Image (cartoon, helix red, strand yellow):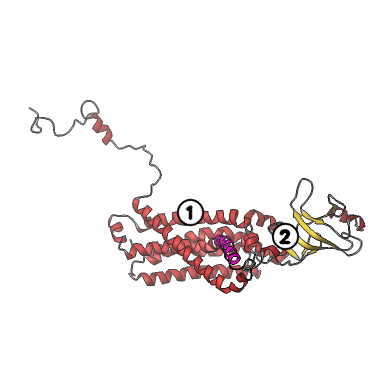
């Protein structure tokens, strides 16, 4: 009789791949070629990610609300002077700060992403949630995965906001608080350096690409035989279409085209319109160049900014600022991730148990990073270093620092 249990059955199944116990044998064999699926967020990861979004949303709403209160009280006189009285002022404020909320998201988004990560990890320490995780054999850096995911999602949101939303509302963002939108903006005359045409006017409507009281001064010998000023009640900027390049359509132009004494090159740049009193002047001097031109490139999309850099109508100093803005525009997104990786070891140091002191050190890291970015921008605009070097130096420094402090983290 075989040894076994009370009923005489063997205690273990046969270790043969055939017969009884074959299924258990096959299931117990290691699957060497089994492919692992993509990593799945655990319950604790989702818990941290939800806390991250909660902190980011509250921080954004609080800071933007503070900005609205300060700006509204500062410009309360201008707002009350708007037509339709108090009702018009409220409607103007709602419209104005709705547009500025997108601008504030672009300015605050990177800092808010880092602050949300730091506050989330601080709450983990404050509530004593780190020790059970470490006791389970989970490394501390595993907790940064949901934080990095949240930061990357914020970066994607900032890219969409920068490329799709802000370029569409840039003419609203350039308006000052309390400005009457029906009166347009103040015109800043400028030269088209490719054609030497000087453009001025009385009022500019950026949303309509329209210039009121336009004055176009045509240079002598380059376009006309003598210096000539063409005035128009209204000038519309039109993009390139077919064989016709981009330029300004002057309606009600005086003098008319037949009265202009054009040279050979002038006949290529000053073209007839649909009626006798219309003149089309070829020019790359777009309406946004005639208002807030020192800073309006910040509201352009990347495609528009690249097109500007290849435009000869811009001065060298302006081209340097735009080139620097193009280099730093997308390098700030990896900087956000690197700052998170640099601040987490500082916040969760082995030797320290003071959360407030660690948060102060993290604030110092963020301040040093911001100061480094501003210093590099200043050196680039002063032509002391190249624009690409000025954009990459903070990335290299923060990346090196984040690797250097990895040994500080509590494990």
Q: Earlier in the sequence, mark 1 or mark 2?
A: 1
Using residue 53 as the reference point, say whether residue 15 is left or right of it: left
Neighbor class of circle 2 (other Cα within 10 Å; few <14, some 14-19, many 20+) is: many
Looking at the image, the residue that sits furthest to the top is 19
Nearer to us in this view, 199 or 154: 199
Using residue 80 as the reference point, say whether residue 40 is left or right of it: left
Using residue 345 as the reference point, say whether residue 240 is left or right of it: right
Q: Position of residue 334 (x, y in %)?
A: 51, 58
Segment colored magenta: 87-103
Is residue 197 in sight in this rendering?
no
Asked whether residue 373 is drawn in magenta, I would say no
Neighbor class of circle 1 (other Cα within 10 Å; few <14, some 14-19, many 20+) is: few
- Which mark, residue 153? 1
Does residue 38 sit above or below 360 in this rendering?
A: above
Quarter of the image that includes the N terminus:
top left
Q: CA distance from mark 1 to mark 2?
A: 34 Å
Quarter of the image that includes the C terminus:
bottom left
Does residue 306 sit above or below 70 in this rendering?
A: above
Nearer to us in this view, 24 or 89: 89
**Label 1 secondary element:** helix
Nearer to us in this view, 25 or 53: 53
Q: Position of residue 208 (x, y in %)?
A: 70, 56
Asked whether residue 91 is drawn in magenta, I would say yes
Using residue 72 as the reference point, say whether residue 383 is left or right of it: right
Is residue 62 in sight in this rendering?
yes
**Label 2 secondary element:** helix
State the residue position of label 2.
Answer: 287
């Amino acid at each position: 009789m075989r040894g076994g249990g009370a009923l005489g059955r063997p205690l273990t199944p046969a270790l043969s791949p055939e017969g009884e116990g074959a299924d258990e044998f096959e299931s117990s064999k290691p699957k060497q070629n089994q492919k692992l699926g993509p990593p799945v967020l655990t319950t604790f990861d989702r818990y941290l990610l939800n806390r991250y979004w909660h902190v980011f949303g509250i921080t954004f709403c609080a800071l933007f609300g503070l900005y609205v209160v300060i700006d509204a009280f500062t410009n309360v006189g201008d707002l009350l002077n708007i037509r339709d009285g108090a009702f018009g002022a409220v409607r103007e404020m709602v419209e104005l700060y709705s547009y500025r909320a997108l601008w504030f998201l672009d300015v605050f988004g990177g800092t808010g992403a880092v602050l949300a990560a730091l506050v989330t990890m601080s709450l983990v320490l404050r509530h004593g949630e780190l020790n059970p995780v470490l006791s389970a054999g989970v490394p501390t850096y595993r907790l940064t995965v949901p934080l990095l995911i949240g930061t990357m999602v914020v970066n994607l949101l900032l890219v969409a906001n920068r490329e799709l939303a802000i370029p569409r509302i840039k003419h609203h963002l350039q308006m000052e608080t309390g400005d009457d939108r029906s009166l347009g903006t103040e015109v800043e005359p400028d030269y088209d350096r490719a054609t030497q045409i000087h453009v001025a006017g009385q009022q500019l409507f950026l949303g309509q690409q329209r210039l009121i009281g336009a004055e176009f001064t045509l240079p002598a010998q380059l376009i006309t035989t003598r210096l000539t000023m063409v005035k128009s009640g209204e000038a519309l900027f039109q993009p390139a279409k077919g064989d016709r390049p981009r330029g300004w359509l002057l309606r009600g132009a005086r003098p008319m085209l037949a009265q202009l004494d054009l040279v050979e090159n002038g006949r290529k740049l000053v073209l007839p319109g649909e009626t006798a009193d219309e003149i089309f002047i070829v020019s790359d001097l777009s309406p946004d160049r005639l208002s807030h031109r020192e800073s309006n490139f910040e509201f352009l999309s990347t495609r528009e900014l690249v097109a500007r850099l290849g435009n000869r109508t811009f001065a060298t100093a302006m081209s340097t600022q735009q080139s620097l803005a193009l280099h730093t525009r997308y390098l700030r997104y990896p900087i956000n991730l690197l700052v998170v990786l640099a601040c987490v070891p500082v916040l969760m140091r082995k030797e320290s148990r003071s959360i407030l002191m660690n948060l102060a050190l993290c604030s110092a890291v963020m301040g040093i990073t911001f100061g480094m970015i501003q210093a590099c921008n200043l050196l680039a605009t002063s032509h002391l270093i190249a624009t690409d070097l000025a954009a990459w130096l903070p990335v290299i420094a923060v990346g090196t620092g984040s690797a250097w402090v990895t040994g500080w983290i509590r494990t």
